[in-house]
């Protein structure tokens, strides 16, 4: 029986340096499918934020928004959203603390404005939306009643700390993934990339030992801990090295291809 291969998007399947999926990775994806394995994008990105490059890959399914949306061969298997009452309490906290947040749904991402100078990573996100017309985005929170998760940015750590304190006072539990002192990802507490893998493996009646997770950053930890096998990209966070089974080369140095060869998927 073929294996289930799960790939993070940014800096795992998609190089932010070249704004593309490496050619060697495209070849590896194709060969793995020809050899009977299934490939999935398991990402913090919402379903609508894939773009031309990732859409060019024949993925068998998409596990998006850190486990809050699961699609298998165009069938929506699972979808979770933060309650509307909580969303409406979050939105006014954003300007209160001078935060910029990307509020994500499966169909569209909602941004505070188009200021690409506020934070470097946010600038990259805004440029991606502006340069790829397949990615739906709105530069206003107007009319938004509910969302799946969000990423948030501040100019300094003090502003972020104050924002997070207010979030933690809400009657709803979140998981806070720290990428830096001024950049967090906030998701419903009971859902993550690992729960998405469990859900899909159960749906396909395959054991977790048949699952292989490829990632590079802190929001991939739940994926590493859930899948039977875990692979860190060579460009990944150094503190994650002790959590994984195998470390491959950099994304732009044929990291995906080399890992797939190591496990004899291709």
Image (cartoon, helix red, strand yellow):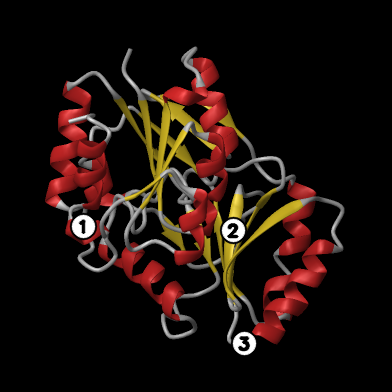
The residue to which callout 1 is attached is 20
The residue to which callout 3 is attached is 156
Secondary structure under tag 2 reads strand
**Which of the two labelled residues, at mark 3 and mark 1, occupies the earlier sequence position?**
1
The picture places residue 110, in percent across and down from the top left corner, at: 52, 60
Q: Is 45 situated left or right of 34 in this image?
A: right
Please tell me which residue is depicted at 50% across the width and 18% down the height of the picture.
207
Q: Is 11 situated left or right of 186 in this image?
A: left
Mark-to-mark CA distance, 3 and 2: 18 Å
The picture places residue 32, in percent across and down from the top left corner, at: 21, 29
**Which of the two labelled residues, at mark 3 and mark 2, occupies the earlier sequence position?**
2
Q: Is residue 161 visible?
A: yes
Q: Residues within 10 Å of mark 2 (few under 14, many from 20)?
A: many
Which disc number belongs to residue 150? 2
Q: Residues within 10 Å of mark 3 (few under 14, many from 20)?
A: some
Q: Is residue 76 visible?
A: no
The picture places residue 221, in percent across and down from the top left corner, at: 54, 50
Split into 4 quadrants, where in the image is the C terminus? top left
Query: Splitting the image into 4 quarters, where does residue 80 fall?
Result: top right
Please tell me which residue is depicted at 41% across the width and 80% down the height of the picture.
116
Q: Residues within 10 Å of mark 1 (few under 14, many from 20)?
A: some
Mark-to-mark CA distance, 3 and 1: 31 Å
Q: Is 128 situated left or right of 108 in this image?
A: left
Q: Is residue 96 depicted above or below 151 in this figure?
A: below
Split into 4 quadrants, where in the image is the N terminus? top left
Q: Nearer the viewer, mark 3 or mark 2?
A: 3
Total labels: the figure holds 3
**Which of the two labelled residues, at mark 1 and mark 2, occupies the earlier sequence position?**
1
The picture places residue 124, in percent across and down from the top left corner, at: 37, 72
Q: Is residue 93 depicted above or below 42 in this figure?
A: below
């Amino acid at each position: 029986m073929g294996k289930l291969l799960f790939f993070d998007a940014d800096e795992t399947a998609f190089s932010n340096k070249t704004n593309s999926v490496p050619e060697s990775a495209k070849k590896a994806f194709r060969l793995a499918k020809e050899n009977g394995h299934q490939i999935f994008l398991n990402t913090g990105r919402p379903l609508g934020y894939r773009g031309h490059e990732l859409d060019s890959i024949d993925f068998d399914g998409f596990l998006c928004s850190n486990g809050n949306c699961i699609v298998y061969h165009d069938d929506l298997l699972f979808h979770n959203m933060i309650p509307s009452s909580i969303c409406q309490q979050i939105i006014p906290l954003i300007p209160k603390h001078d935060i910029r947040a990307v509020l994500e749904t499966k169909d569209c991402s909602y941004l505070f404005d188009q200021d690409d100078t506020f934070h470097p990573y946010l600038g990259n996100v805004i440029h991606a939306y502006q340069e790829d017309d397949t990615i739906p985005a709105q530069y206003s929170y107007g009319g938004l009643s509910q969302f799946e998760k969000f990423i948030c940015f501040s100019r300094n750590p003090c502003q972020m700390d104050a924002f997070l304190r207010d979030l933690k006072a809400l009657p709803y539990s979140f998981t806070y993934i720290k990428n830096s002192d001024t950049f967090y990802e906030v998701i419903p507490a009971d859902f993550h990339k690992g729960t998405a893998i469990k859900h899909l493996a159960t749906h396909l009646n395959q054991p977790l030992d048949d699952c292989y997770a490829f990632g590079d950053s802190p929001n991939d930890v739940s994926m590493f801990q859930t899948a039977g096998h875990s692979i860190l990209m060579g460009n990944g966070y150094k503190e994650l090295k002790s959590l994984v089974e195998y470390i491959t080369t950099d994304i732009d140095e044929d990291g995906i291809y080399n890992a797939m060869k190591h496990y004899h998927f291709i």
